[in-house]
Amino acid sequence: MGPPPRDRLGASLSTFRVILLGLFAGLLVAATIATTALYYGSDPAGSDIYYSWGEGARILRGENPYSRILGSDMLHNDKYPTYFPLFYLLSAATQGMGFREYPEWIGLWRIVFAFFDVGIIAILFWLPYRRGLPLLAAFAGAFWALNRWTLFELRIAQLDFIPIFFLLLSLALFEKRQRLSLLLFGVSISAKQIGIFLAPLYLIWAWRSAPEASRRRATIVALATLAVIPLLLSLPFLVADAEGYLRSIFFSATRLPSSHFEAFSIDAELGLVGLWAKLPMLALMALVYGLALFGQVGRFTAALLVLSVFVDFNSVLYTHYLCWVVPLLPLAVSEYARPSPPVPAPAAA
């Protein structure tokens, strides 16, 4: 005897659903490739990515790019290198491989950025789908692939797809592969440290997940694990010029307010500058850390709230910052959405 009608119907619908989602995901990947091809010949000189190429060229010449900030007032921006060094090192490495001129270098990196864009689509499909939320999986993939901020990121060839990919993968793996998750988070902030405001969340999650007797040790180990990759990459620059490196990294916290939207943060409206200007943002983030400490929100929801506070309260707001919030919206919903009920058996004749 074969399986009962209800089981056969459920299996058929499940297969059809997988095929349909696969085709839909393929269309989104094709759209990403087409968009990349559309912008492939364009030259975003003058954007942030152009200066990342320049920092890589300086490294190849044996210069320390972080030393440029020495003598600055720590308020006015002169396109200083403010990221941890991972992407600057990758910029130098690809130039050393023969992609010396900016047009050919940015052509290579457009392909790399598109690859990570597709990786984000895959994560956004997989995480809701494995929770039994196929419609949300389709929505999450399309919401990321086709929204204006992702398309804008592809047009200007920013590097945010790389750290966002590793951040999402890190959040997804934390429960089952905590050590790997922390290392991936370290990779994310090494490329661009916007996600660094999530570091207290990772320490809180490590503390909560450990047995009570070993919570302090687990938190220290977690801190060392997430910091090891950024620290190792930073060491050569710290040894060469510790002041220049530290001033460059902390410049983002002291610089004058700026916004691509002419929509300024509360600290700018109040005339605050420097570290004092960060107090409203940090106070709201502290409330989210409290929610996580008491286990009142899930991982993706906590990450969404922290990065939303960053976008809405940071003194500087650039168009590509919005990309960091977009993928977390459907993933936060997936933590509270209910899977579809079982397929009902067909009525008897």
Image (cartoon, rainbow, N blue to C red):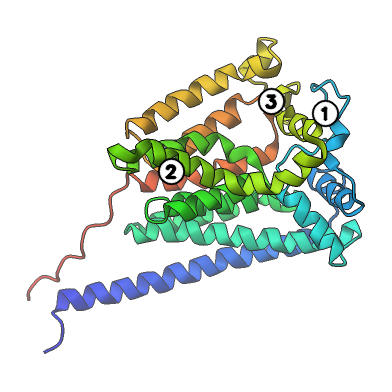
Q: Is residue 345 left or right of residue 109?
A: left
Residue drawn where x is 69% and y is 48% of the image? 233
Q: Secondary structure at mark 3?
A: helix
Which kind of residue does numbered mark 2 sit on?
Phe
Q: Is residue 61 above or below residue 107?
A: above
Which quadrant holds residue 282? top right
Residue position marked by numbered label 3 in the rendering: 253
Residue under the point 43% across and 29% down: 289
Q: Position of residue 227 (x, y in %)?
A: 58, 43
Q: Indicate the amino acid at tag 3.
A: Ala
Q: Secondary structure at mark 2?
A: helix
Q: Secondary structure at mark 1?
A: loop
Q: Is residue 181 above or below residue 111?
A: above
Could you give the CA–CA distance between mark 3 and mark 2, rounded to whole angstroms? 25 Å
Q: Could you tell me if residue 140 is visible in this image? A: no
Mark seen at residue 346: none
**Extreme-top residue of the structure:** 270
Residue 1 horizontal side relative to residue 107, left or right: left
The label on residue 300 is 2
Image x and y of residue 211, in percent: 29, 42
Tell me which corner region of the image, top left, top right, bottom left or bottom right, holds residue 119: bottom right
How packed mark 1 is, by other alpha carbons closer than 10 Å (few <14, some 14-19, many 20 or more), is: some
Amino acid type shown at disc 1:
Asn
Viewer-nearest of labels 3 and 2?
Answer: 3
Left or right of residue 206, residue 103 in this image:
right
Give whichever of 151, 123 is nearer the camera: 123
Placement of 303 over or under 62, stated as above or below? above
Kindly identify which numbered label has been placed on residue 77. 1
Quadrant for residue 204, please give it: top left
